[in-house]
Image: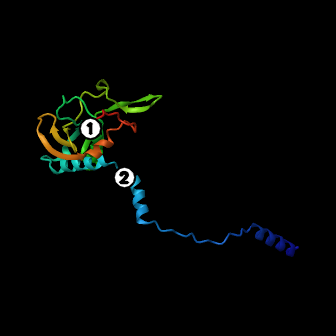
Amino acid sequence: MKLSIFVSFTALFLGACTVLPAKHEVSQTEVSDEDKAAAEEIYTQPYSAKYSAELAEQLVKNASIRLNSAKVGITNLVGVTGQYDKSSPLSMVLSEQLVQELHSRELSVLDFKATDFIRVTPKGDFALTRDYLELDEIMPITHVLVGTLSHHRDGVMANARLVNINTKEVASVAQVFLPAHVVQQLSEDHGKPVIRKAP
């Protein structure tokens, strides 16, 4: 009786055991420097971000005030010969990039286009607006980033300055030249070719 129980238990125990396959070593192929560079290139920022970073760096370096107490609103750079009431795709992109660049340098940046509600629509959910009636009338902005773009044969000169919104005193300045090929990247309409006059 004891023998039959022992045999039954041994058979049950051995039946529950699982035989695992032998471990195979996974060969690790080394990635060449060229492949690494190609992979990194996919995720690099557009060229315009380099120039926004340079503007931000100059603004911080050239500041005549303590920037940690400033509340900054960033506007679009405008054409130097225009009426100061129109922006361009280049201007809008530079402004968006400057929000990121100045914030990363620990400046207090206020997004005055943010509403105090979320608009839910079939086309998406939004909290930004360009309708001034939907914005707060009073915001604690102490300084505003303004500037101009002047077009040259080989590119665009961007001049930016940080101005006290109450006294109009210039607190910092920056200047950078964007080559024509960088400007051209931002002159296309979402991949559609721009129709230009024949020479």
In the figure, residue 100 lies in which quadrant?
Answer: top left
In the figure, residue 39 lies in which quadrant?
Answer: bottom left
Task: Please tell me how crowded label 2 is: few (under 14), some (14-19), or many (20+) other residues with Cα within 10 Å.
Answer: few
Quadrant the N terminus occupies: bottom right
On the image, the x and y values in percent for residue 158 come to: 20, 42
Question: Residues under labels 1 and 2: Cα distance?
Answer: 21 Å
| Number of numbered tags placed on the structure image | 2
User: In this picture, is 140 found above or below 106?
Assistant: above
Task: Please tell me how crowded label 1 is: few (under 14), some (14-19), or many (20+) other residues with Cα within 10 Å.
Answer: many
At 21% from the left and 46% from the top, the residue drawn is: 177
| Mark 2 secondary-structure assignment | loop
The extreme bottom residue here reads: 3
On the image, the x and y values in percent for residue 17 come to: 73, 69
Coloured how? rainbow
Determine contact: label 1, label 2, CB under 8 Å.
no
At 43% from the left and 61% from the top, the residue drawn is: 35
In the figure, residue 149 lies in which quadrant?
Answer: top left
Q: Badge 1 is on which residue?
A: 91
Q: What amino acid type is highlighted by mark number 1?
A: Ser
The extreme right residue here reads: 1
On the image, the x and y values in percent for residue 49 come to: 30, 47
Q: Badge 2 is on which residue?
A: 44
Q: What amino acid type is highlighted by mark number 2?
A: Thr
